Image: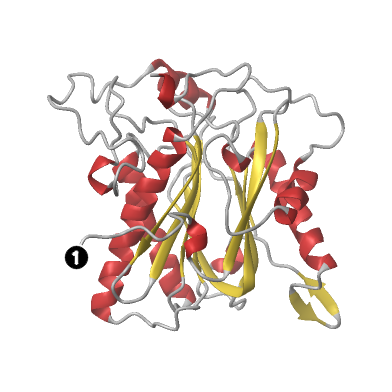
């Protein structure tokens, strides 16, 4: 049976999580947070050559911590890692975290993308604003949130177009739900050559990112590498960062495998991807709320859905972007 989207077509169709955004229009940057209702099993896979991360070592299957409390995606390059401190402050105030010796320690892995030269004012003084943006994003968390020029995708760009924040979900016949959340800021392109058609077209459900399918005939410039690609590749100013979540019951090892499978969605939606100058990363998150432990057959569907859902979320990120002052690139809708 073909995959079908969840009721909201957002990562929050996965029971047990909420999402919040915060951004500063003058800064042209922002932060997105995923909050877990209860501690959730998580893993991570990095395939880009220039990642920026916090607290990712604890997610490896051989390490002792079994569950985390939140995940952060942020703009701001290395400065954006401060956003996790704001989320920690929010959770600690609510006494949510790992308890040890009477102390509450929220576990909040984070990843960042580069948006420092996108036309925004980065003259923030002594301390960057990302800690406060992280706190604000956590305060804003809920089941519904906006896509495009929001949160961690506020200042994102792609090869020749604005990037953004995207999300999608898939309901499986097994009762499992898969959801993707992505801040798409890649070196490569999400559209085929100079056309408006998305590389992710084969996975589109309905017309969630325009319903255009693949171009016919296929354009001669489909494999051309644009000016933006050349310039940003030299600067190392890129990265697509994402979360793939499910309500299935998974081990840490299986959550990492889920993140690995979701990287296939990068390859289906972005060309080229996983370059030495991208910090491409996917967090895998399992809330276990469905109560379903995947059988071998069900696991195949789960991992296939991870890649397809991620590809759709990437296309929706660019499809939903909106114009703001001092943009370096046009929006998809204006092409």
Q: How crowded is mark 1: few (under 14 residues within 10 Å), some or many (20 or more)?
A: few
Name the spot of residue 82 as percent of width and height, x first.
Answer: 74, 47
Q: Residue at x 58, y 65 (%)?
A: 17
- The total of numbered circles placed on residues is 1
Going by the image, does 224 lie left or right of 256?
A: left
User: Residue at image x 38%, y 73%?
Assistant: 176
Residue shown at the point (44%, 20%) measured from the top left: 228
Residue situated in front as seen by the camera: 1 or 39 = 1
Q: Position of residue 138 (x, y in %)?
A: 71, 55
Taking the view exactly as shown, the residue that stands out farthest to the front is 7
Q: Quadrant of the N terminus?
A: bottom left
Q: What is the basis of the colouring in this image?
A: secondary structure
Tell me: residue 107, above or below residue 151. Answer: below
Q: In which quarter of the image is residue 154?
A: top right
One can see residue 262 in this view: yes
The residue lying furthest to the left in this view is 217
Q: Report the side of 207 relative to 35 (left or right).
A: left
User: 279 or 328: which is nearer to us?
Assistant: 328
In the image, what residue occupies the spot 76% across and 49% down?
A: 136
Q: Could you say whether the residue bearing mark 1 is in a helix, strand or loop?
A: loop
Mark yes or no: residue 160 visible: no
Choose top left, top right, bottom left or bottom right for residue 63: bottom right
Rendering coords of residue 317 (x, y %): 46, 39
Query: To which residue does mark 1 refer?
Result: 1
In the rendered image, which quarter contains the C terminus? Answer: top left
Q: Position of residue 315 (x, y in %)?
A: 38, 39
């Amino acid at each position: 049976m073909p995959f079908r989207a969840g009721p909201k077509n957002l990562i929050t169709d996965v029971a047990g999580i909420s999402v919040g955004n915060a951004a500063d229009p003058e800064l042209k940057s922002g932060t997105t947070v995923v909050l877990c209702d209860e501690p959730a099993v998580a893993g991570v896979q990095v395939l880009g050559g220039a990642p920026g991360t916090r607290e990712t070592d604890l997610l490896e299957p051989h390490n002792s911590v079994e569950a985390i409390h939140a995940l952060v995606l942020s703009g701001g390059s290395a400065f954006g890692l401060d956003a996790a401190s704001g989320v920690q402050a929010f959770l600690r105030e609510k006494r949510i975290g790992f308890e040890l010796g009477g102390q509450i320690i929220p576990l909040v892995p984070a990843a960042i993308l580069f948006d420092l030269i996108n036309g925004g004012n980065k003259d923030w003084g002594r301390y960057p604003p990302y800690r406060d943006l992280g706190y604000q994003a956590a305060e804003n968390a809920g089941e519904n949130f906006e896509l495009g020029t929001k949160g961690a995708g506020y200042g994102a760009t792609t090869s020749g177009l604005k990037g953004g924040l995207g999300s999608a979900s898939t309901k499986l016949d097994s009762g499992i739900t898969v959801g993707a959340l992505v801040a798409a800021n890649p070196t490569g392109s999400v559209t085929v050559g100079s056309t408006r058609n998305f590389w992710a077209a084969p996975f589109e459900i309905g017309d969630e990112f325009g319903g255009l399918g693949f171009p016919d005939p296929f354009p001669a410039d489909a494999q051309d590498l644009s000016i933006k690609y050349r310039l940003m590749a030299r600067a190392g100013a890129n990265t697509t960062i994402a979360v793939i979540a499910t309500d299935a019951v998974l081990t840490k090892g299986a959550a990492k495998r889920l993140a690995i499978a979701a990287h296939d969605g990068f390859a289906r939606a972005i060309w080229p991807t996983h370059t030495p100058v991208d910090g491409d990363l996917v967090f895998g998150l399992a809330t276990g709320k469905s109560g379903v432990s995947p059988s071998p057959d069900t696991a195949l569907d789960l991992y296939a859905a991870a890649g397809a859902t991620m590809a759709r979320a990437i296309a929706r990120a660019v499809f939903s972007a909106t114009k703001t002052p001092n943009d370096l690139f046009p929006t998809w809708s204006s092409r």
